[in-house]
Image (cartoon, grey):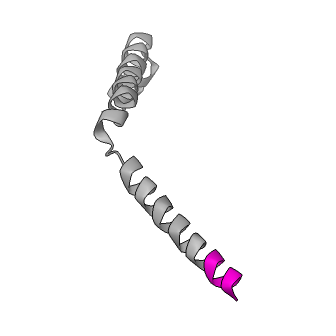
Amino acid sequence: MLDLIYFKLTDPQFLLSSLVAIATMLTILTVAMPLIETDTLSQRMKSVATERERMRARARATDRG
């Protein structure tokens, strides 16, 4: 059993095939990640607008005294 594992880990063709498979999976994952993620831009824009309104209200309150 250990001999088989040692043989596979030292076999250049197996190592190259494994590295190519890993590189292919990572490439597919890299390309697919933007498609999987949800678009949070509208949520961020809404929170920025809300915070901007709060800041304006605070500025108006301090200007009025």
Q: Position of residue 1 (x, y in %)?
A: 30, 33
Q: Which residues are magenta?
A: 59-65
Could you tell whether 49 is left or right of 27 in the image? Answer: right
Residue at the image position 65 percent from the left and 75 percent from the top = 59
- Disc tally is 0
Residue 2 position (above or below residue 42): above
Quadrant (top left, top right, bottom left, bottom right) of the C terminus: bottom right
Give the residue at the far front of this rendering: 64
The quadrant where residue 22 appears: top left
Q: Position of residue 46 (x, y in %)?
A: 41, 59
**Prevailing secondary structure class for the magenta stretch in the rendered image:** helix
Residue at the image position 70 percent from the left and 80 percent from the top = 63
Residue at the image position 44 percent from the left and 55 percent from the top = 44
Q: Nearer the viewer, residue 8 or 38?
A: 38
Residue at the image position 36 percent from the left and 20 percent from the top = 24
Q: Nearer the viewer, residue 26 or 52?
A: 52
Could you tell whether 46 is left or right of 57 in the image? Answer: left
